[in-house]
Amino acid sequence: MTRKKRILVGKAGLDGHDRGARYVAHILRDAGYEVIYTGIRRTPEQIVEAALQEDVDALGLSLLSGAHMVLFKKVLDLLAERGASDILVFGGGTIPPGDVEALKKMGVKAVFTPGTPAAEILAELERLLGEKERR
Amino acid sequence: MKALLEAARRGDRRALARLVSLLENEPGRVVDLFGKGVEWTSPGLTLAVTGPPGVGKSTFVSALLGRLREKNPSGRIAVLAVDPTSPYSGGAVLGDRVRMMEHSLDEGVFIRSFANRGRLGGLAPGIRAVLRLLGLTGWDLALLETVGVGQSEVEAASVADLVAVLLAPGQGDGVQMLKAGLLETADLFVVHKADRPGADRMAAEIRAALDMAEPGEGGRPPVLLVSSVEGRGVDAFLAALEARRKDLAERIRRRREGAREEDARLALLHEAGARLEKVLEGKREILRALLSGGMSLEAAVEELLRAAWGEETDKGGKP
């Protein structure tokens, strides 16, 4: 049986705007993924623990607060601490181009800024998840 | 699988999560969990929480978690929350966790979301197997939150020890509730969102409906008013739950005994079905012959079973 891919979509920190996160959750659902939505204003610890318990393949964080450098770092560190660096981390939100590069260096596999077409998000995630599977 | 199980027993929640995925995708593998002489265990108690969509099942479960963990910090609780799969894409948005996030860092709590993957009846594939896993890894209580069910989906009753049915004021009248299925399934009724107007009337309506029905084993189910947001009625619910557990101890024992055999039966059939499906993929000519009328159904079944059997002996014959 083919295993259904599971993706956690969440928001960390003091930022209650979740239109983007909900939008992404829905396009992922419509593409056949099982999406675990964890809601707004969560701590990196809560998000990482949820990702582990839900045994997800990928974890997407939406950030519009400006705290993305700190929060992504924290999430990646916590995943590493728990031996779960195989979980693919991607992001979205209002993130300046310079920071996108820095996040990618840090280990965030993809960053989708506002206006990214749904098809592009899906194609990129499919590619990354396929790559992960082959490893 | 054995290494994961050992880790899960030591409290490694990622190992447990991995095993849950495995059983969700291949429920038949539950048999591999149990070796010779290992008993087919269940969690200490499995309580199903069911009711129509939007009645507040996740919020209620979260309120129970909070109170139970406070009262008994050593009692470990697992939550299995089921949401519907989209019939169009096969995908799902699982949002029950949103209402339970305050418990996500609690070491004594494990929360897992399931998509029902098109199954009717309110549960997801593999739930029975996962409950066995929770028994084997020492969980004291499993709270099973079903998808929002209507009037005839009563599958929860076949896997849980006790079933709590949630209703809320403003959702359906007394006549709706008399419809068969959900009413007979309930061991406890909860009028949820009791802070809203109409809750008392609704409780009275349910009691009236119950009075008309033949009382089942253990007597008439209690009807409790609970407001999870105000934290009202949660203790009374827990006391009623304990009482029902005692009154229905004999039925719980019987149900568990039957479930053991049913689990093994389903595991066997599931695995056999999956294998036949694979064989058929390589033998599309059987399907074509069936379609063209060249083969009767009976003959096609014979042919398929023969093909599966041939494959087995081939495998056995290889060095």
Image: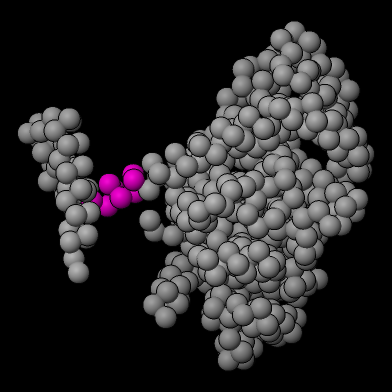
Tell me which residue sits at (77%, 64%) in the image. B107
Rendered location of residue A83, percent (x, y): 62, 80
Give the residues drawn in magenta, as a range: B272-279
Residue nearest the viewer, comparing B242 with B233: B242
Farthest residue in the top direction? B212
* Res. B13 visible in picture: no
Q: Quadrant of the C terminus of chain B?
A: bottom left
Magenta stretch: includes residue B298: no
The relative height of residue B220 versus residue B106 in the rendered view (above or below) is: above
Residue nearest the viewer, comparing B318 with B151: B318
Q: Is residue B257 left or right of residue B141?
A: left
Residue nearest the viewer, comparing B15 with B60: B15
Tell me which residue sits at (47%, 56%) in the image. B32
The relative height of residue B242 versus residue B18 in the rendered view (above or below) is: above
Tell me which residue sits at (54%, 81%) in the image. A109
* Res. B275 visible in picture: yes
The relative height of residue B175 versus residue B200 in the rendered view (above or below) is: above
Farthest residue in the front direction? B37
Tell me which residue sits at (91%, 43%) in the image. B231
Rendered location of residue B243, percent (x, y): 84, 30
Residue nearest the viewer, comparing B256 with A66: B256
Magenta-highlighted stretch: main secondary structure? Answer: helix
Q: Is residue B54 left or right of residue B312?
A: right
Give the quadrant of residue B267: top left
Rendered location of residue A42, percent (x, y): 76, 67
Q: How is the image coloured?
A: one colour
Rendered location of residue A104, percent (x, y): 57, 87
